Amino acid sequence: MGMAASALAGYAIGNATRTPVIEKSQVPANEASRLVRAAGRESHHQGNAWEQLTALLAPNSREDEIWKIISRIPTKNIPEAIHELRMTQLRAATGSAEERRLAEIESALYFKWAESDPIAALADVSTRPGPPDHRAAAKRIALLKSVLAAWMRVDANAAYRAVKDHKNFGYVGRDMLVQTWTAENVFENLKQFPENNRDLLGWYCVAAAKDEAQRNAMLVALKEQPEMRDRDWGYFLLFRDWAYRDFPAAMAEAKKHDHPGLEQHVLEDGLNQQPAATMRWAVSQNIPPGGPSWERGYSNWLRFDPADAKQWLEEQAPAWTSEGHFAAVAGLQLQQLGLMEKIDMKAVQPAWVALMTKWQNKDPEAAEKWLDSPFARSQGIPNILTWKDADAHE
């Protein structure tokens, strides 16, 4: 068993008397929207529940009967119902609509189970196959989300504590927990988990960045916490993930905040994660190029869209060299050479001759120093500059 039932019981007993800070947990809609309909309905009419479950597992049964039937199954019989379901799943074709329908029934059963006995439901999920079988692992995570969704409706903190140290479940609990928080209660909730404070703050900011209202509320909340130890970390992640969606807007807002290094951190992350959009934005803001972040970012761009990356640099290089950014252009052109299996001298020589000619005319000492550097020589730049096309002289 990946997580012993006794350990899960320990979590629950240790936290049973604690009042959660969250006054009203709101389970993420994508995890519990349909499952919630089964909540709190332990029917007095259970006599024919097994017959109805058998009918429900049959092919072409009515999907709208799922919630009504499962709500009638006594909690003590849920494990047996899950066993019956699994026998039926063995006959369903992989990837079929029938397999998906049975998976939905299974999720509903675990949700129902977790409403009354979340520790037992979680312990059962932990026994299911997981990594390295990716398909089995994904199925187990889906069931885990059903269990946590039901548990978090009652006690989100206890649900998270039960999984936070599990190597395969912890991140799921974390992501679901922070989605129950708001900017108004995030800092109070963080006090409940001092050992995970930085991690939870970061992931709350990542989640908040996706929604304009939540993002703006969190910006206000962070501003009101000037002494908070990890405030700068929260700001960075909030702006970083905002920049993934709208880089210009995120950077424009970052300029308004007096946080040393914030703009540069977001810019460098953008160069690494979305180099095309970031470099084009940087040019529009007259931000000078150069340095390892630009070179790594341009190399990433070349890997994903070499034609676009090469055309952009070809068009941008003259403006940069006219401003004296010779070393930066050389560094980016070196990235092109580094990704070539075999250098086509005839194709690459014109750009290098044009660059070095301008550089030597403008600053011959700096140009010669760069040409004599280990990285220029290792890429054969001197050889490229002196190469002669034998066919042209025949």
Image (spheres, rainbow, N blue to C red):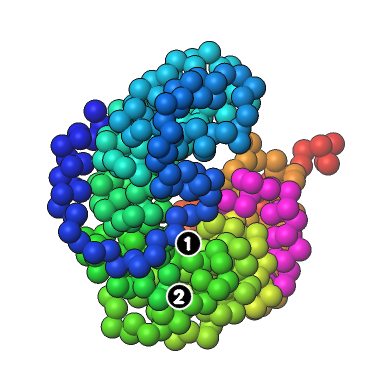
Q: Main secondary structure of the magenta part?
A: helix
Q: Position of residue 348 (x, y in %)?
A: 71, 49
The residue positioned 32% from the left and 60% from the top of the image is 199
Location of residue 133 with respect to 148 vertically, above or below = above
Residue 305 is a magenta residue: yes
Q: Position of residue 299 (x, y in %)?
A: 57, 52
Write the residue at 72% across / 56% down.
351
What is the span of residues highlighted in magenta in the rendered image?
299-321
Tag 2 near tag 1, CB within 8 Å: no
Looking at numbered disc 1 in the image, what kind of residue is underneath it?
Answer: Ala
Q: In the rendering, at what x and y percent does residue 65 appear?
A: 57, 33
- Distance between mark 2 and mark 1 Cα atoms: 11 Å
Is 362 positioned to the left or the right of 295 in the image? right
Element assignment for label 2: helix
Q: Which mark is residue 218?
A: 2
User: Relative to the observer, which residue lies in front, 72 or 318?
Assistant: 72
